Image (cartoon, grey):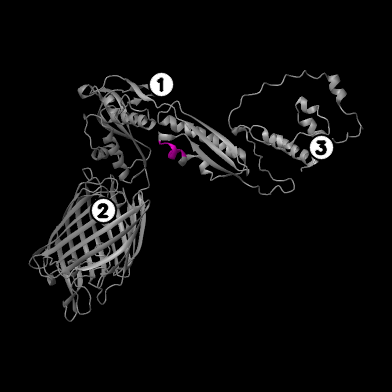
Amino acid sequence: MESRQAKRVRQALALMMMAASPLPLMAQTPSPPPPEEPILPDSEFEARLPRTGQADAPLPSIDEWIDRQMPQPEAARQLPPAIEPREDGELAQPLPPLDSVQVPLQVATDNDPGEKTEAVRYSVAIEGFGKTGLEQAFRDSSALIDGGGKADTAAMVQARAHEDEALAVRLLYSEGYYDGTALASLDQAGDGALKAILSVTPGKRYRIGDIVINAGPTVPPGLIRDSLPLKTDDFIVAAAVEGAEANVGVRLPENGYPFAKVGQRDILLDPATATGDYTLPVETGPRGSFRGITTTGEKQAFGADHMKVISRFRPGELYDSRKVDDLRRALVATGLFSSISVDPVRTNEPGPDGTEYVDLNVAQEAGKPRTLAGELGYGTGQGFRAEGTWTHRNLFPPEGAVIASVIAGTQEQGASGTFRRSNAGKRDKTFQTGIAINHQNYDAYEAYTLGLNIGWSRQSTPIFQKRWTYSYGAEVLLTNEQVVVDPATADKTRRTYFIGGLPVQVGYDRSNDLLNPTRGFRANLRAEPEGSLQGSFSPYLRATFDLTGYYPVSNDLVIAGRARVGTISGAKRDDVAPSRRIYAGGGGSVRGYGYQELGPKDANNDPIGGRSVNEFAVEGRYRFGDYGVVAFVDAGQVYESSMPQFSNIRYGVGVGGRFYTNFGPFRADIAMPINRQPGESKFALYIGIGQAF
């Protein structure tokens, strides 16, 4: 049995704990304030002060202190001193409300302020979401659940419960349950642990009643209403309403209203019918037509005249914000600006068909035009290779770039200079000319080459993926190369070739992404009539055709395939410079084999190239989050004949990993040859950006 003194100590501790406990979670009915006591007169206040020099009064005993601090019912005060209330009488009292459970704050002792206190543990129960479908969304954002069932103090548990009450109500409102309520309470189990209970009452779900749009006339008349995909009797879902209003804000500028503003909606709820009448104010502003471009900025990359070349609209055309966004993206793609903005400006001047002319103001700030880049790598059959590039992107405005490049490697060395003008007289058209001197020393050939080239092209970029691409131009090569005279003996000699060519390339792209396609296909044809410029002209044709396709089996799995055929027609193999022959093997060809490793070989087992090729590949690409795995089979062969024979095909198999980023996947593949022949690589590793094809 507990002694009287021990019980008194327990009661005192309980009083102190109750005094330190936080406010209960649920709001309680406030008790009436105590009556104000009269202001104590100065004379009485001074009379109550202890006299100077008076000894301190003795401290009260713990029994006296408890009796003073614990008001007792009148009947209890009259009990004889020898009679104590039965302890089991406390068990007969009703349980306290769930929200009034008091748990002591966890505090360090005075003797050890740094002492770690025991965490408060709790469990969570959620009731009432029912068929709303919101419980999982609540669990994903719940402060109680995120806490993992532990908190430093009971006050922290209560604070999390208050947050979850508000979260539940917000979720209910977002789905149209405007009568919904949520109440959190705490219960204390026998072992001292807490249980947080969230009780949700969704109530009725409201639907859209009448839809009213307050706006001026538009062309066509129903433009705003047709752009607002809301219907009477739809549930009032916040995301759907906001999305519908955003669609209005997008569609109006796309149809000639550059200054349109969507106002603040008003939804008048009727609890009797569980409906809400929806009203949306819209300021359309004037209907506009394009006129011109102006540009501002202290440091400009180029002027408005070149911006007109880049733009896809003409003066007098109906204003369309999509063409404005296109101009902004094209200016960003030049890489010449540190900041750029394109905004419509009112002119108050009449335009065609009752419109008002609108100018576009381009606020620009030129960025640093110079770039210094480097590249370091290693390839099987290619050795180590380092390349440094210096670029001035706007040395000859507008967009006249000069590029200087140096290559240093174990098997390749060289230098080149290039002039390139982007958007040369026409949007997306590039002019380029350059000179290069190069030395290559591979197993297949050794060549010292001087080349001149000139060309025009229209190619895809990461910002603008084009359906049709092309390039055409001319090149002249002077190359001195080591040639195998007799493959049976591997005897070699050196020859000089003077070659002229007219390369042409056409591409068609229906894939959905430039670096990571998951559906569609691509086709590319390259043809280059060329020939010797020494003595009598000896023409021949070098041509290749590539076809790739992508099929999504599911959201996570894509099957990709590739096929390539190539030919050199009109000349014997020995009449074609070794560096201009056809080779296969390597990361962009048949993986599992070294660079240029497939095809005819000489007595030293070195490749000597051929006049035709066929290649095939299939990949299974599985993605999970930002990562992916790939399994693949590659196949191909090079032939001495001008047409592929589709015989003696060699195979390579492998696996790879992918890490997906915003601009494309990083790729790492490892492959090995099937039925490996003497001198062939045991395996090969390929690392790059973008998929293999």
Task: Give me the C-alpha separation between circle 1 and circle 2.
Answer: 67 Å
Residue appearing at x 30%, y 33% in the figure: 294
Amino acid under label 2? Phe
For the record, the magenta segment spans 133-138
Q: In which quarter of the image is residue 682?
A: bottom left
Label 1 residue SS: strand
Q: Please tell me whether residue 678 is drawn above or below residue 343 in the rendered image.
A: below
The residue that disc 3 covers is 62
x and y percentages locating residue 90 in the rendered image: 70, 35
Give percent across and percent down for residue 518.
27, 50
Q: Quadrant of residue 42?
A: top right
> Is residue 281 among the parts visible in the rendering?
no
Q: Which amino acid does label 3 sit on?
A: Ile
Question: Which residue is the site of mark 1?
Answer: 269
Identify the image quadrant of the C terminus.
bottom left
* Left or right of 113, for residue 173: left
Checking the image for residue 419, the label placed there is 2
Instruction: Kindly check if marks 3 and 2 are in contact, taking CB atoms under 8 A apart as contact.
Output: no
